[in-house]
Amino acid sequence: MTSPVRSLWDAPAASPPPPRRVWRDWVLVTVIPPLVLLEAALRTEVAWRWLWAVVLIVLVPTLLWRRARPLLMLVIAFGTGAVVAVATGGDPQFVSTAYMLLLVYAAFRWGDGRARIAGAALLAASTTLSLAIGPTTPTDLIGGAAVLVATVSLGAGLRWRAASRARELDRVKLDEREQLARDLHDTVAHHVSAIAIQAQAGTALAPTDPAAAAAALRTIEGEASRTLAEMRSIVRVLRRADAAELAPGPGLGDLGALASGDSTGAADAAARAPRVDVHLTGDLASVPPTIGAAVYRMAQESVTNARRHARGATRVEVLVRVDDAGIRLDVRDDGDAAASGSPGFGIVGMVERATLLGGTCTAGPAPDGGWTVVAALPRSGWST
């Protein structure tokens, strides 16, 4: 085989995998048989109409397995149809036969490379058989080929689109892991720098001031404990080998900057941007730098999304509460009610960051209008 054909032959099934069955499948297998019987009763001019009606009804259940076994269902349906067509001397003339296009679509939407190649060969053989056993006009041939090509193209196009979105989602998650790892790395670098400074100070003071040296050792002990905890968190995420900064990243103390619009990077939109109010409550000093940086990133993303996409929003409220259970972030705008849709990449990144830290993050339209983002990071998932 040539390289492109071999690549297609070895290609895996669609990713993400298909749902096994959905409610539409049961609607199809319920509605199609009565339609076939109705067409058989009304179209008295069709030869062997009751035989074809029985065959088409018997093949309807193949729709239930068209995603899990696309090639097998296609072979069963088209193979049975070919046998009956040869026996009766012609193809079925029923409009209801069009439901078999769903099997063609499924083979190219969900099947692996072998299923797609074999499916294409089966369609070519079926078309050739139709030309051989019955009178076929050029118009019929061109029209049938156009329908098949359109069905195959639709399946392949939606397959490519879903795979592209899945790859983009994976990229966003990896970027979020990388950013979290950067925050962790920078925090660890800060602690290690403090340990080195205290060790140098303790060494210098030990001959003349043992008490000061002991205090430096206690500081080193605390910094080392925090550093070890942060390093345990680093192994859970990915990071490129870039130069690290020695200062920790932004944290809870930097949330006030969101009210000034620094997070959006769009100074020209400041005049029409909604006002941002930030409220912090609880023991903020007890929050580890890693958790503070994560909350800041999620709040920053939420405010940026509200400023860019919230229609008619005049105010964005950012509320951070720290208590014995952990830390909770609530971001809400007063814009128009948002239509439902698939989550954007920013939301995917926030959910990924919260999940990595043992918490949760949800985003969606509020019942009374606007958009809300709620993130909770329990203390059980904190590194310190």
Image (cartoon, rainbow, N blue to C red):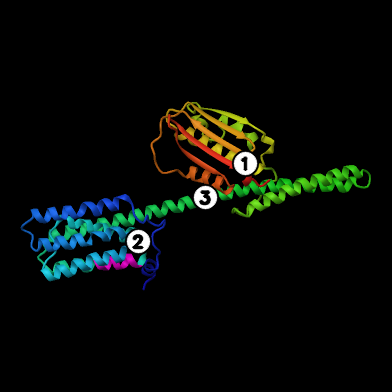
Placement of 30 over or under 111, stated as above or below = above
Q: Which mark is residue 68?
A: 2
**Distance between the alpha carbons at the discs numbered 3 and 1:** 17 Å
State the residue at coordinates (16%, 62%): 54
Q: Is mark 3 on a helix, strand or loop?
A: helix
Specify the quadrant of the image occupied by residue 139. Answer: bottom left
Q: How many residues crowd mark 1 within 10 Å: few (<14), some (14–19), many (20+)?
A: many
Query: Would residue 350 be seen by someone viewing this image from the given angle?
Result: yes
Placement of 279 over or under 48, stated as above or below = above
Q: Which mark is residue 293?
A: 1
Question: What span is colored magenta in the figure?
Answer: 114-122
**Distance between the alpha carbons at the discs numbered 3 and 2:** 28 Å
Specify the quadrant of the image occupied by residue 80. Answer: bottom left
Q: How many residues crowd mark 2 within 10 Å: few (<14), some (14–19), many (20+)?
A: some
Label 3 belongs to which residue?
173
Mark 2 or mark 1, which is nearer to you? 2
Mark 3 or mark 2, which is nearer to you? 2
Judging depth in this view, the residue of 295 and 346 nearest the camera is 295
Q: Quarter holding the C terminus?
A: top right
Q: Please provide percent x and percent y for residue 352.
A: 53, 47
